Amino acid sequence: MFRFDHFNFNVLDLEKSLDFYRQAFGLSPVGSIEPEDGSFRIVYLGDGKTGFRLELTWLRDRTEPYNLGECEFHLALTAADFDAAHSRHAAMGCICYENSAMGIYFVTDPDGYWIEVVPEKQAD
């Protein structure tokens, strides 16, 4: 009856976020919404493999960082080549937490959202 469609992150600097998600995960825009008055902009990012989309929402009048609470939520992506992904994220300086025992790590995006990186074999 239902299926996942998208997940939203509100961002302060849309171009910086688009660049981060392209560099960190290879995500690219698959759609967008922008009203004539320019008061907001929504860009949907896709992985080119699934129908799931990450929605980035930018609000023109927003100047303060978003309150992310205790960051007890996160988005997770699988990596076919976990070691290469880890090397890329380490070079970008965005790894914020590693759990070697579980074989996962987390990165933060420009707005402080946490993204979990899971080896493809553990994705189930």
Image: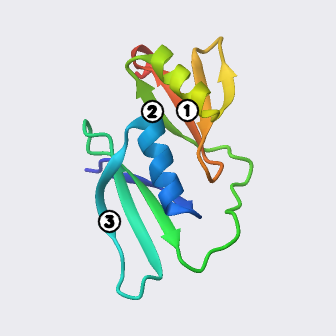
Q: Are marks 2 and 1 in contact (CB under 8 Å)?
A: yes
For label 3, the SS is: strand
Q: CA distance from mark 1 to mark 3?
A: 25 Å
According to the picture, the residue beneath numbered tag 1 turns out to be: 116
**Which of pointers 2 and 1 lies earlier in the amino acid sequence?**
2
The crowding category of the residue bearing disc 1, from other C-alpha atoms within 10 Å (few below 14, some 14 to 19, many at least 20), is: some
According to the picture, the residue beneath numbered tag 3 turns out to be: 32
The crowding category of the residue bearing disc 2, from other C-alpha atoms within 10 Å (few below 14, some 14 to 19, many at least 20), is: some
The amino acid type of the residue labelled 2 equals Leu
Frontmost residue, 98 versus 90: 90
Provide residue 30's location: percent of width, then percent of height.
27, 54
The amino acid type of the residue labelled 3 equals Ser
Taking the spot 51% from the left edge, 53% from the top edge, the residue there is 17
Taking the spot 25% from the left edge, 36% from the top edge, the residue there is 49
For label 1, the SS is: strand
**Which of pointers 2 and 3 lies earlier in the amino acid sequence?**
3
Q: Are marks 1 and 3 in contact (CB under 8 Å)?
A: no
Q: CA distance from mark 2 to mark 3?
A: 22 Å
**Which of pointers 1 and 3 lies earlier in the amino acid sequence?**
3
Which of the two discs, 2 and 3, sits closer to the camera?
3
Frontmost residue, 116 versus 24: 24
Q: Residue furthest right?
A: 70
Which of the two discs, 1 and 3, sits closer to the camera?
3
According to the picture, the residue beneath numbered tag 2 turns out to be: 77
Q: Residue furthest front?
A: 91
For label 2, the SS is: strand
